Amino acid sequence: MVNLGGFIVGTDVTARLNGSSSTNPDIDFDKTFGNGSDNTRVRADALWRITPNHHLRFLYFNNTADRTRAIDRNIAWGDYTFQAGATVEARTKFQIYELAYEYAFFRTPDVEVSGSLGVHYMKLSQQLSGTATFTDANGATSAASFARKENSVPVPLPVIGGRVAWAFAPQWFLEGQGQFFKADISGYDGTVTDLRAGVTWARRKRRSDGAE
């Protein structure tokens, strides 16, 4: 099959990185640094039809956003402090790996309605870089230029979803899919809603007797 599509992505990322002897306030990445000026988005979907009704689905998604802005207030990130007026680059990288079982509970020659249940693994990393000061556990301050935080969910978590496909022509399919991901473990809390709509063209292989 061949697919061609685009992305509409909305985010709401709030995070903090505490220092060795301090608790820092939350940073709203989207409000503080604005929309991503340089984005890389990759998505890969695979579906294996074990039988007409039983399927396995795999998803990989990567959304990386780089944003650069002159900040209007001091930002504390771990033991680093970026001073107001400094130019800071913020990078947020978000990845999802998913494996799910899908069952087609309604099938006709032209329509298929399926539900899915599976597991997913999320990884989120956030990095701030720019001119900053570094304060160690003894209170000594020095110049620095790099600070980073990386979190990941260490165990698979559930995902639920549904899919509807309609064959409106012999080799063309209109498909809609929705999935809901949830993570709440080890200080990492968030949700992801994945909605997808697309048109698919499928090449049908002819047998030696001319049938498809």
Image (spheres, rainbow, N blue to C red):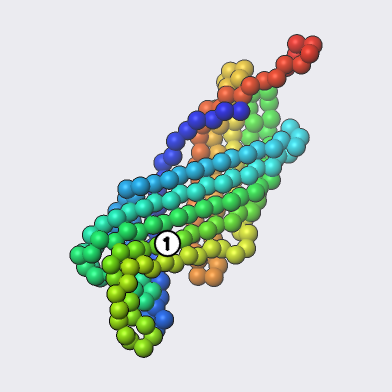
- Asked if residue 53 shows in the view, the reply is no
Residue 36's spot in the image, x, y percent? 34, 50
Q: Quadrant of the C terminus?
A: top right
Task: Say left or right for 16 vs 160.
Answer: left
In which quadrant is the N terminus drawn? top right
Q: Nearer the viewer, residue 19 or 30?
A: 19
Residue drawn at (41%, 81%), measured in percent from left and top? Answer: 20
* Image quadrant where residue 158 sits: bottom right
Name the residue tied to disc 1.
Answer: 126
Which residue is the extreme one toward the right?
209
* Location of residue 81 with respect to 40 vertically, above or below: below
For label 1, the SS is: strand
| Residue furthest out toward the top | 210
Q: Nearer the viewer, residue 122 or 12?
A: 122
Residue 99, placed above or below residue 32 = above
CA neighbours of label 1 inside 10 A, class few (<14), some (14 to 19), many (20+): many
Relative to 184, is 198 above or below? above
| Residue 177 pos. (x, y %) | 55, 39
Q: Is 163 left or right of 21, judged from the image as shown? A: right
Q: Residue at x 59, y 56 (%)?
A: 121
Residue 33 place in picture, x, y as percent? 30, 57
